[in-house]
Image (tube, helix red, strand yellow):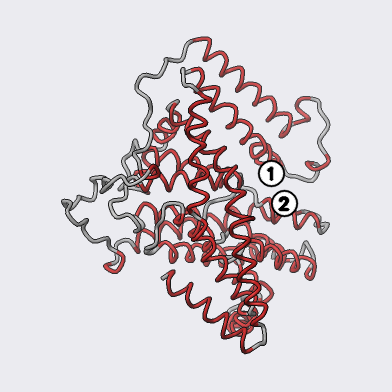
Amino acid sequence: MLNYIWLGLIVLAVIIGGCTDNLKEVADKSFEMAEFAVMKTALPLVGIMALWLGIMRLAERAGLVALLARALRPLMVWLFPDVPADHPAMGSMLLNMAASILGLGNAATPLGLKAMKDLETLNPRPGTATNAMCTYLAINTSSIQLIPATAIAVLAANKSSNPTAIVGTSIMATTCAAVAAVTMAKILQRLPMYRLPPVTGMPLKTATEPAKPAAVNSAADKAPIKEAVGLHPLQWWGVLILTTFGLFFCYLFLRMAFPVMLGLPVSPEAVNQTLFVRIVDAVSKLSIPFLLSAFPLYAMLRNVKVYEEFVDGAKDGFDVAIRIVPYLIAILVAIGMFRAAGGIDMLSRALKPAMVAVGFPSELLPMVLMRPLSGSGTLGIFAELVKQCGPDSLISRMGGTIYGSTETTFYVLAVYFGSVAIKKTRYALLAGLTADLVGVIASIIVCRLVFG
């Protein structure tokens, strides 16, 4: 499906650009987006990837990833029956989901790429997405987010009386999107057209028997690191250090979420926030500092050589970031050309009568069409929408809820699948777009019910 969509975007961009005299803009945008994909997306990702892959290496060596996977084993086994329950991919996916839920963008993407790399070690068909990969990407494109921070920031910048009002509606809409994504993925993987053929030269596996990699071709395909058997046991003084460290972060959490309890003044930015928003905001701000310090500390207390292991894990950051460059260029250039040609505007005008007939606000249509294609483009449209309609209008709150409950599906698929050289994406795109559609519909209905 992605082959046809990519070709369609390119060809339509040229045709529409020729008809509207925008061919120069189309050509210029193709070069601009190619540069953007490399210089503004892939290269900045190198440092972030190196940091978080190093931290993940410590978490694996210390046994934290395996511990996390065991804690939520029933849910993960149901979602990913083809992945062994004790495989590091389970822990990597859980960490990525947790980061997405808390809105930790800088941490979520590297952790997600690490999860894809772990899933690839179980892939007997290199270049073809497994059922686990497709389900994971469907969840990732619809991941529940507690605080839509970007949308709230836009509303607050435009002097909204209650910019956090969309928190509840976003949670409800994105929950509907996540359920729809998983359901669609489970349905599609059973259809004959998406069923995986037997692996050539290997015996047919049963549904419960995990797949094994056909070959190890590179460092990226090597077997994942499992919990070290000879870890140094945690001594009583180690437990004391970890307890003290945890109490310190508990104090920081209380100071940020419940300042009055400690006799401290409430910060200006928290004055208009509800208790729920203050709690989630505190957790979001403390999560990255906690992970960056707690994982190495725990690993050191279990006799892991933290510096050496961190460096070994960080080495993969550059390889992963470079590997996704061709996929990023392909998808971002096609999207940029289509947008520069005026394709989004033409599509909006064509669909407007049908949308109005079913009660869909026509003002939101350009934003909805842009959302799966471009995050920055969607943000620009949303900001303009808030200025035109007012920050406290029903339309603006609908737009903020849509922004917080949907994802740039094409970008996510290009980055995640590109990191492990997956070209046959099977039903992942359809499941992701289904999540976006359900998220949009749920946003409209929920906002009408909540805000009238």
Between the C-alphas of marks 2 and 1, the distance is 8 Å
- Element type where label 1 sits in the image: helix
Bin the neighbour count of mark 2 within 10 Å (Cα to Cα): few under 14, some 14-19, many 20 and up.
many
Q: Which residue is mark 2?
A: 164
- Left/right of residue 123 with respect to residue 326 in the rendered view: left
Q: Position of residue 242 (x, y in %)?
A: 56, 19
Check if mark 2's residue and mark 1's residue have beta carbons within 8 Å. yes
Q: Is residue 395 above or below residue 145?
A: below
Q: Is residue 136 left or right of residue 171?
A: left
Mark 1 highlights which residue? 277
Q: Is residue 233 visible?
A: yes
Q: Quadrant of residue 197?
A: bottom left
The residue lying at 40 percent from left, 41 percent from top is 90
Q: Nearer the viewer, residue 51 or 384?
A: 51
Q: Is residue 193 above or below residue 312?
A: below
Rendering coords of residue 3 (x, y %): 42, 71
